[in-house]
Amino acid sequence: MEDDAQVAAAVRRGLEAEGYTVDLAPDGLTGLRLARRHAYRAIVLDIMLPGLNGYKVCEALRADGVTTPILMLTAKDGEYDEAEGLDTGADDYLTKPFSYLVFLARLRALIRRSQTPGPLLRAGDLWLDPAGRRCGRGSAEITLTEREFAVLRCLVEHPGEVLSKRRIVDEVWDIAFDGEESIVEVYVSMLRRKVDTPFGVRSITTVRGAGYRMES
Amino acid sequence: MEDDAQVAAAVRRGLEAEGYTVDLAPDGLTGLRLARRHAYRAIVLDIMLPGLNGYKVCEALRADGVTTPILMLTAKDGEYDEAEGLDTGADDYLTKPFSYLVFLARLRALIRRSQTPGPLLRAGDLWLDPAGRRCGRGSAEITLTEREFAVLRCLVEHPGEVLSKRRIVDEVWDIAFDGEESIVEVYVSMLRRKVDTPFGVRSITTVRGAGYRMES
DNA sequence: AAACCCCCTGAAGCGACGCTGAGAAAGCTG
DNA sequence: CAGCTTTCTCAGCGTCGCTTCAGGGGGTTT
């Protein structure tokens, strides 16, 4: 216990030296309250805690919908049930005693992994996630086909700029494509029906004789 | 030097006779490379190594997040401090000269102690333990074949991201694989039958023309 | 105002894509 | 060596998306 407090203090000093900001909770209940109030980048949780044990805290947090990555510190003599640990929703485990370097590496890995949401392309409240190949307006997700997505992406990547059909065909279609440029008209039509009309807006403007423009 | 090489060879023969598989590195850098690429059950590290010494190797591995238990072999004459060895992240140390039986016992103890749940990959209530090569949903464990596990792991490592069949084949299969990408379809089908259908969910989404996506 | 041009959009064919069951080949275990 | 598991291929089938076409609407020019 006194030992634990010393370890905790050492860990805090180490992390703060790395540039992290650290909040330390003396017991489970305090930790739970802190975690509920703040949006931490990661939570380190000791199983052996005064008051409320680590499992309970973890379970309570997950039940609250807190998705912050949790690193659980388990005792050396694995007295606990493994399945229980998996169920409560921790993201990683570390068995005591551990080296500080390992601890740091695991914590970093955890934080890195939780920052997955890739860069979004935006135009107003319209968003496009190239990595996940998703798209939507506001909180509503919109299902697009491959070609539709490619055309919309092309437009959103150049907001406020007029793109000729020729240019869009060149960027979206294969070089071997020998069809008409009018294919773009068809896709713009379909896009408007999916991303504009249902929301009562008009984000893709036709510039007669020149092409199309994404309003930013 | 020559002595060391002979000791190493003898240790190798002994361990192989016990049924272990052994990789031997002639110098620190080679060892580091091997340890980074493979998931060994344990690493035996001599402090006196050509090129990169044992402390450096150990430190580098731990900084990379490699948690494989490390047994450090130190020289008798206290030029190096034992405590220093433990500081860099070794799990146990042995002072030369030592008896083979002691060595074996310590190694076994290390391996036994290290079999705790490692870092978990998660996607919703689906979990994957790469170290233990186990997987499950919630508290239910799911049995997967090697390939199934590798494909699922590949997907779970990039949650919310669309992975093309090409990319999955590249990550999971051998470079020498010259089959069709459609093999991925077969494995996704089998995975869905094991990890999705029995639980009434659909976590692996098909993105037609693009690939597959693990819903996060 | 008429003619012209550009664009919109619904319909439909067809080719491509993905899913799945069956089974052969290779590997492992007892 | 026999029986089991695992891996991979193949083919059939259903579905979906890409593209074309044609008719209509609405600016623009003469």
Image: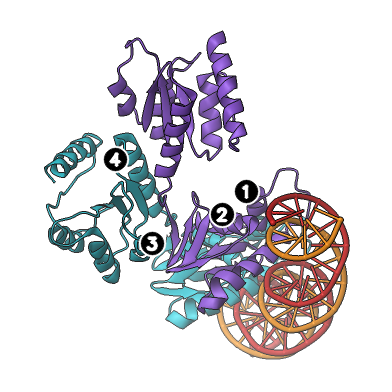
Chain colours: A cyan, B purple, C red, D orange
Mark 4, residues whose alpha carbon is within 10 Å: few (<14), some, or many (≥20)? few
Q: Which residue is mark 3?
A: A86
Please name the residue shown 49% across and 52% down the image.
B132
Q: Which residue is mark 2?
A: B154
Please name the residue shown 69% across and 65% down the image.
B185
What whole-number distance in Å separates the C-alpha atoms at marks 3 and 4?
20 Å
Do the dots labelled 4 and 2 sit on one chain?
A: no
Q: Which residue is mark 4?
A: A97
Which chain does tag 4 point to?
Answer: A
Q: Earlier in the sequence, mark 3 or mark 4?
A: 3
2 vs 3, front mark:
3
3 vs 4, front mark:
4
Which chain does tag 2 point to?
Answer: B
Please name the residue shown 60% across and 38% down the image.
B19
Do the dots labelled 3 and 4 sit on one chain?
A: yes
Residue D16 in the image: x percent, y percent?
A: 66, 77
Residue B107 falls left or right of residue B184: left
Q: Which residue is mark 1?
A: B171
Do the dots labelled 1 and 4 sit on one chain?
A: no
Residue A12 vertical position relative to residue B151 in the rendered view, above or below: above
User: In the rendered view of the protein, which quadrant contains the C terminus of chain B?
Assistant: bottom left
Between A180 and B63, the one nearer to me in the picture: B63
Residue C13 vertical position relative to residue B7 in the rendered view, above or below: below
Amino acid bearing label 4: Pro
